[in-house]
Image (spheres, helix red, strand yellow):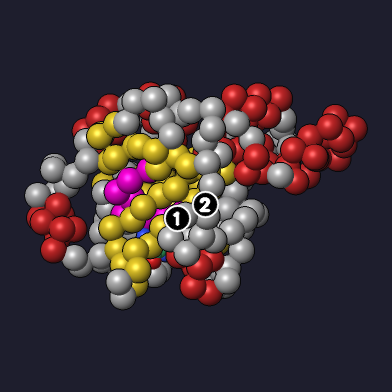
Amino acid sequence: MITRRGLILGGASLLAGCDSLTDSPGLMRAEDAHRFLQRSVTGRAALAREFRTDQRSPLFRVNGTGNPDTPEYNALAANRFADWRLVVDGLVARPLRLSLAQLRSMPQRAQVTRHDCVEGWSAIGKWQGPRLETLLDLAGIRDDARYIVFHCADRFGTTPYYESIDLIDAFHPQTILAWAMNDAPLSVGHGAPVRLRVERQLGYKHAKYVMRVEAVASLASVGGGRGGYWEDSNGYEWYAGI
Ligand SMILES: Nc1nc2c(c(=O)[nH]1)N[C@H]1C(S)=C(S)[C@@H](COP(=O)(O)O)O[C@H]1N2
Ligand SMILES: [Mo]
């Protein structure tokens, strides 16, 4: 097996030209992010480790919100999310409203990965769903887009949970909108009907209960302006790469 470390050591000289790009992750256009990921095998483009299915954790903790429990969410859940639509909008040529059935019929990626929470626990699970790239290509992400924002159904008090990533993570092959966990539809606890998996980032970036995916040029006018609920409220780092 080729490990990330092996690739980093072996490809050190090849990497030199890429380092400057990783220093300013938010400044890349979609086209450049694509090219960056296609050409690199290390750094930001490297894959997170994937595990065998028998290495999955017997217990995967539910953390943060375990049920949004709003009237709107409860109505959607009561109908097993048949009426839920994922909105893809912002700086895109063709805004989308996608049903769960449509997400399931797109090309799928499945991966067994380790989730690392800043609170000091990890768990390995299997996730499946379409790549975020597939949705952004369908919607036609515009040249002026720099970040993707995930708006969630749950609230802390009156503040909605949200998160954001740059285009390198958005187009990363392991970045998916997961509707299945361990071969079953996502439970409410783990983010039904759909949650983000962005495997090179810490747990709080993996937005659950995603209702809307928005392409933006800047994070300044979203939420408190720091790119995520925990970033705004507790000073967590926006870039939580692992
Ligand atoms: N919408 C939403 N997404 C969220 C959270 C949350 O409270 N609300 N918690 C985050 C944190 S801190 C972690 S560790 C993971 C927990 O995911 P899990 O419940 O599937 O373990 O979800 C992340 N995504
Ligand atoms: Mo977390």
117 relative to 46 in the view: left or right: left
207 relative to 171 in the view: left or right: left
* Local crowd size for mark 2, using a 10 Å CA cut-off: few (<14), some (14–19), many (≥20): many
Q: Residue furthest front?
A: 221
The residue type indicated by label 1 comes to Val
* Residue at point 47%, 64% (across, down): 224
Which residues fall within the magenta stretch? 206-213
Q: Residue furthest right?
A: 13
Q: Residue 117, how many percent across, how many down?
A: 53, 66
Quadrant, the N terminus:
top right
Q: Residue 12, how many percent across, how many down?
A: 87, 36
Specify the label residue 219 is tagged with: 2
Q: Check if residue 10 falls in the magenta segment.
A: no
* Local crowd size for mark 1, using a 10 Å CA cut-off: few (<14), some (14–19), many (≥20): some
* Residue at point 63%, 44% (across, down): 26
- SS type, badge 1: loop
Q: Quadrant of residue 17?
A: top right
Q: Residue 153, how many percent across, how many down?
A: 28, 58
Q: Say which residue label 1 marks.
A: 222
Quadrant, the C terminus:
bottom right
Q: Is residue 129 visible?
A: no
Instruction: From this view, report whether residue 74 is shown above or below residue 89.
Output: below
Q: Quadrant of residue 176?
A: top left
- SS type, badge 2: loop
Disc 2, disc 1: CB below 8 Å?
Answer: yes
The residue type indicated by label 2 comes to Leu
